[in-house]
Image (cartoon, rainbow, N blue to C red):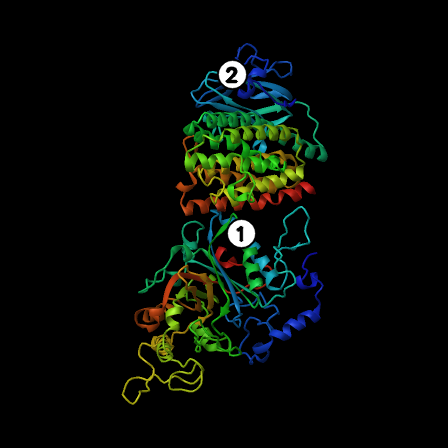
């Protein structure tokens, strides 16, 4: 399941499989002088994100991120439009984790996200050196590769968090399962465009009660959600939880192998917003837990990741559209961020009709320009 | 693919158009000779009405049968984005009123990977007399777009009228667009496409469908009936009344800010009717409430609809033939220093109310030179005294400044306002 481009060393779910040590040794942490990228130290705290260098030679670099703060953090390298070039998640306080990122010449931003929320603490990063400009076709092909990389950046956490959720359900720990439900779903909702392409698995994982025909068995997140929030009785949900885990494992396996074609990627970005418009703003998705805003945020981020993968093509063919999308994503993020609560989100039922309308307007404002991306990609 | 007519796209030629035209020609075929140059009125119910002219179409244009009305809140904070939207809207409106698709590629002429720039439900339908009329509400003139100094005094808020029960969420708005057409699908298509163009810059605050006109704005039209079954607005201002229109309908230079000269002010009121209780009222009481006979529409004591009303006439017992609190007396210009309105309202039914009653009424629209000298005194009198109040309730209100018409394709909605 590893990509040659990004290696997340020491991901929690797979700690046992990794050979490298995850403790920082601080000895060889600066970019090497001879133009060959080496290890770059990143000192993350709750308020800072010190990257040991702001200039790098083109090529593959190793970032060693040490969390000296009190909150769990993440580290990202972004290209224009918040295109994720690489990232490492779930760095608990005191831990150092490494990530290999291939960066062609260009300007980037590094970001630490203490508490794993928001835009993070950003710093510029300049990469210089020879990097052949991509041909049009190569740019499109790269979009698929880039998005595949994004999917892989999410699947590890999806497996981890789903496992934790499933464990809590099987242990009969209602409180913990309730807490983990929206967290596990976040990773699921971010990659839904690719997940949805596997016809039978998506409904098994994510069907709502009303989606089923008579006689069909209801499984997945929402079945457990109903038991958690309505009856509070999950004593019989062990097999449902096991099936959920198995289905998620299967979909992760397939999703990681999937190279989403650029056009489908463009449509996926739009469909994620359609999901928000029809399911999350109305509160239909998580009708028992009312944690729809978690899914909303995840869909929005997933949509942005899909657009970001297409960014080099957009920049060349329709820079005005790229700029509009940047603005509208910012506006939608800003509208949503009004409803932060701690590390998570307010419940759907805590929002007034007026607040929901403002969110709806922001999504409409973004979805219209996003609907134009496919034609630009298809040019 | 540009500038293709919706009908031609589907292979309907002139013969098809003529067939539709013949079916709906009726009243319009005998339009009287007009004084002055009004906006071109469609000769048939399928023809287009000119989008350009000295006045906005959709005011004195002979009232079309159907309405889709929308009020927007402006959500962008950038003046230039709003101006850009008004330009885009104008271009789309110019196209749609001529029976064309909203965008240049149309419902089926664009790239297959792109969403069409027209939504398509009007494909194959003629222009159907579509008019699109824009108005700017008082709230647009706050501090967001630097328009405060251009706010006309006539846009001052309406006073509270006794008995009204206004719901803010279906009242007011920064910008309104009135779409009138002879085909409801054409009116809905126009508003839907304009709303779509506006996403991110405006947000629909409220909207209203009207299924049947309740006013005639030309002597060529018969007076239609409201849902109480009465001809209402017999004495409406009409296209042919050139002198009265100048005095009562159009804003004159010097009335207020220059950008409104040649325009008109629009008042909208959604009036819910308790039609079930009305229907249980005796004919004689109904007629006394309106002050007209129900069959012909003649003033009480007269024979024909357009007979001159005699408010002084007395019954043998000395009481007035036309009751003092009748609708026709209270609303008549002679009661208000000759204040007239150009009414352009529509009947509505929005399903039922869950209590076994139709959710029905009148979406009242009136144009005038100054609402505070015309609508306000008339409505204040009605709100205080009209016996009809027992059967109606005003539930929404809007006030909008509708600028003059557009010269040509180089002009756009609001150009003078944003100059």
* Quarter occupied by residue B14: bottom right
Q: Secondary structure at mark 1?
A: helix
B71 vs B384: above or below: above
Chain under numbered label 2: A
Give the x, y percent position of residue A121.
48, 26
> Where is mark 2, residue-wise?
A96
Is residue A346 visible from the viewing direction of this image?
no
Which residue is at 56% across, 13% downward?
A29
Q: What crowding class fits label 1: few (fewer than 14 Cα within 10 Å), some (14-19), or many (20 or more)?
A: many
Front position in the image: B199 or A317: B199
Give the foreground label among 1 and 2. 2
Task: Check the picture and name the quadrant holding the N terminus of chain B.
Answer: bottom right
* Quarter occupied by residue A78: top right
Q: Secondary structure at mark 2?
A: strand
Which residue is at 66% across, 29% downward?
A257
Mark 1 and mark 2: span between their CA atoms?
49 Å
> Where is mark 1, residue-wise?
B198
B234 with respect to B185 (left or right): left
Is residue B376 visible from the viewing direction of this image?
yes
Give the x, y percent position of residue B151.
41, 58
Front position in the image: B292 or B196: B292
A57 vs A309: above or below: above
Give the x, y percent position of residue A352.
40, 45
Q: Residue furthest left?
A: B318
Chain under numbered label 1: B
């Amino acid at each position: 399941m590893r990509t040659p481009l990004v290696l997340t060393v020491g991901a929690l779910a797979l700690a046992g499989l990794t050979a490298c040590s995850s403790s920082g040794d601080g000895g060889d942490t600066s970019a090497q002088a001879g133009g060959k990228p080496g290890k770059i130290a990143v000192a993350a705290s709750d308020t800072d994100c010190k990257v040991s260098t702001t200039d790098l030679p083109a090529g593959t670099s190793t970032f060693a991120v040490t969390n000296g703060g009190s909150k769990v953090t993440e580290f990202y390298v972004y290209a224009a439009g918040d295109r994720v070039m690489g990232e490492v998640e779930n760095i608990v306080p005191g831990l150092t984790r490494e990530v290999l990122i291939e960066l062609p010449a260009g300007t980037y931003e590094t970001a630490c996200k203490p508490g794993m929320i928001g835009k993070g603490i950003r710093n510029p990063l300049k990469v210089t050196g020879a990097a052949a400009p991509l041909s049009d076709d190569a740019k499109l092909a790269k979009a698929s590769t880039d998005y595949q990389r994004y999917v892989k950046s999410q699947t590890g956490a999806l497996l981890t968090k789903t496992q934790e959720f499933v464990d809590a359900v099987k242990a009969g720990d209602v409180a913990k399962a309730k807490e983990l439900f929206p967290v596990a779903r976040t990773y699921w909702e971010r990659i839904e465009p690719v997940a949805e392409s596997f016809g039978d698995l998506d409904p098994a994982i994510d069907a709502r009660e009303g989606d089923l025909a008579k006689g069909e068995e209801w499984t997945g997140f929402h079945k457990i959600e109903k038991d958690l929030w309505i009856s509070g009785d999950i004593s019989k949900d062990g097999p449902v939880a096991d099936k959920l885990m198995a289905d998620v494992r299967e979909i992760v396996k397939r999703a990681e192998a999937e190279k989403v074609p650029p056009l489908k990627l463009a449509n996926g970005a739009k469909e994620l917003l359609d999901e928000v418009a029809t399911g999350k703003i109305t509160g239909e998705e998580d009708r028992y837990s009312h944690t729809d805003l978690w899914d909303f945020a995840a869909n929005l981020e997933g949509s942005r990741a899909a657009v970001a993968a297409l960014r080099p093509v957009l920049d060349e063919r329709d820079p005005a559209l790229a700029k509009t999308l940047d603005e509208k994503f910012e506006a939608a993020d800003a509208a949503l961020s009004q409803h932060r609560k701690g590390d998570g989100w307010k419940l759907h039922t805590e929002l007034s009709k007026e607040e929901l309308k403002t969110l709806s307007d922001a999504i409409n404002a973004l979805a219209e320009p996003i609907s134009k991306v496919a034609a630009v990609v298809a040019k | 693919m540009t500038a293709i007519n919706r009908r031609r796209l589907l292979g309907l030629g002139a013969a098809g158009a003529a067939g539709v035209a013949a079916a709906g020609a009726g009243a319009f075929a005998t339009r009287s000779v007009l004084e002055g140059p009004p906006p071109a009125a469609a000769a048939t119910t399928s023809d287009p009405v000119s989008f350009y002219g000295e006045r906005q179409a959709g005011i004195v244009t002979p009232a079309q049968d159907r309405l889709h009305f929308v009020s927007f809140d402006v959500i962008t904070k950038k003046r230039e984005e709003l101006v850009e939207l008004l330009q885009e809207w104008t271009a789309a409106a110019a196209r749609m009123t001529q029976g064309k698709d909203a965008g240049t590629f149309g419902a089926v002429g664009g790239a297959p990977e792109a969403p069409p720039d027209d939504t398509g439900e009007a494909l194959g339908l003629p222009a159907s007399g579509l008019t699109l009329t824009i108005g700017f509400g008082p709230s647009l003139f706050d501090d967001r777009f630097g328009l405060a100094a251009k706010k006309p005094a006539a846009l001052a808020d309406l006073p509270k009228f006794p008995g009204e029960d206004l719901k803010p969420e279906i009242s007011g708005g920064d910008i309104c667009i009135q779409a009138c057409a002879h085909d409801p699908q054409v009116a809905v298509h126009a508003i839907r496409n304009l709303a779509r163009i506006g996403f991110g810059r405006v947000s629909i605050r409220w909207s209203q469908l009207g299924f049947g006109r309740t006013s005639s704005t030309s002597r060529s039209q018969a007076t239609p009936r409201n849902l109480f079954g009465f001809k209402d607005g017999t004495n409406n201002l009409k296209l042919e009344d050139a002198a009265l229109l100048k005095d009562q309908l159009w804003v004159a230079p010097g009335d207020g800010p220059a950008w409104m000269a040649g325009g008109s002010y629009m008042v909208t009121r959604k009036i819910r009717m308790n039609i079930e209780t009305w229907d249980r009222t005796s004919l004689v009481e109904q007629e006394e409430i309106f002050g007209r006979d129900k069959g012909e529409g003649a003033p009480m004591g007269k024979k024909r609809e357009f007979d001159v009303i005699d408010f002084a006439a007395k019954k043998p017992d000395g009481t007035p033939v036309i009751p003092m609190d009748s609708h026709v007396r209270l609303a008549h210009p002679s009661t208000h220093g000759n204040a007239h309105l150009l009414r352009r309202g529509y009947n509505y039914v929005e399903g039922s109310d869950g209590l076994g009653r139709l959710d029905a009424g009148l979406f009242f629209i009136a144009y005038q030179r100054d609402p505070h000298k015309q609508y306000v005194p008339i409505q204040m009198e009605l709100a205080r005294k009209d016996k009809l109040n027992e059967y109606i309730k005003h539930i929404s209100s809007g006030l909008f400044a509708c600028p003059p018409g557009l010269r040509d394709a180089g002009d756009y909605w609001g150009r003078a306002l944003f100059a």
